[in-house]
Amino acid sequence: MNEKNPDEVRALVRDQYGQVARQTASACAPGCCGGSSPTASLALGYSADDLAAVPEGANMGLGCGNPQAIAALKPGETVLDLGAGGGFDCFLAARQVGPSGRVIGVDMTPDMVTKARANARTLGLDNVDFRLGEIEHLPVSDAAVDVILSNCVVNLSPDKAAVFAEAFRVLKPGGRLAISDVVQLKPLPSALADDAAALTGCVSGAVSAESLRALLAAAGFGKVTVSVNAESRSFIKDWLPGSGVEDYVASASLEATKPGPAACCGPKCCD
């Protein structure tokens, strides 16, 4: 896959996830999807209440963790979800930030944006906004959001430096990243590294934890942590069965902060 240019990579990813958006959850493709039902999200740290709170089709089992668990969202905050898919994490975030808060979901796949908007209408939410766009070129104003979430999406980008530069741009000073993604544990064998299914399946686009730390620091972030979840091999092995992929990648939690004062939480800023 290294021979493909960035636009070719994006086209592969857009086509794959467009197909996922048009299918039912039970027909979900392998890869980040895990090849299983949305209830697989229980193993990622979501609760049964989380699953029950969203419309059918919002949770397509595409994640590799639970960024909500590390985001510490507060009422009134503005949240941005990179690669929002059917809107699952956006809808959960909307519950936490409340009617005084706002959630923006960005996805480059038109079918996903259409699906997410339909799900938002089903819930009757007016504080969630889904936008079509690439995470390397966010359709979001400078210093507009308090928190950025993402679940198993950054690995799909062919330009991760641009993703983090854009994340830094749109965060307010003191804003934070809370991302679940996949990291590479050791170099992939060519059979995986050159496989299109491994790319769209959140495997061959992953980079090491050290590389992610360096990219985040280069973008200007501070307080960077990348915590690898060794237990994730139990579900990653099902992404590409028989390939041994669980020996080469793992899920991880990424946290970072844009330097500056803490975001204001009302007429008077928080202490």
Image: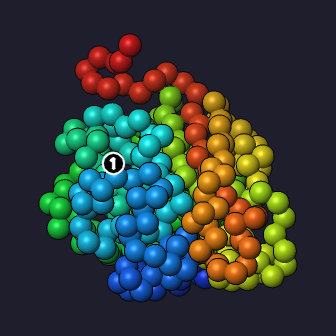
Can you say whether 72 is above or below 121 in the image?
above
Figure quadrant of the C terminus = top left
Can you say whether 18 is above or below 140 in the image?
below
Residue at which label 1 appears: 93
Quadrant hosting residue 240: bottom right
Quadrant hosting residue 75: top left
**Whole-percent x, y for residue 39 in the image:** 37, 67
* Residue 228 is at least partly visible in this image: yes
Q: Residue at x 73, y 49 (%)?
A: 209
Q: Is residue 31 left or right of residue 141?
A: right
**Whole-percent x, y for residue 93 in the image:** 33, 48
**Whole-percent x, y for residue 54 in the image:** 25, 62
Residue found at the far top of this picture: 271
**Whole-percent x, y for residue 141 in the image:** 44, 48
Q: Residue at x 46, y 58 (%)?
A: 43
Query: Could you tell me the amino acid type at mark 1?
Result: Ala
Q: Is residue 255 left or right of residue 205?
A: left
Secondary element at image label 1: helix
Q: Is residue 168 left or right of residue 271?
A: right
Can you say whether 211 is above or below 198 in the image?
above
Can you say whether 268 is above or below 244 in the image?
above
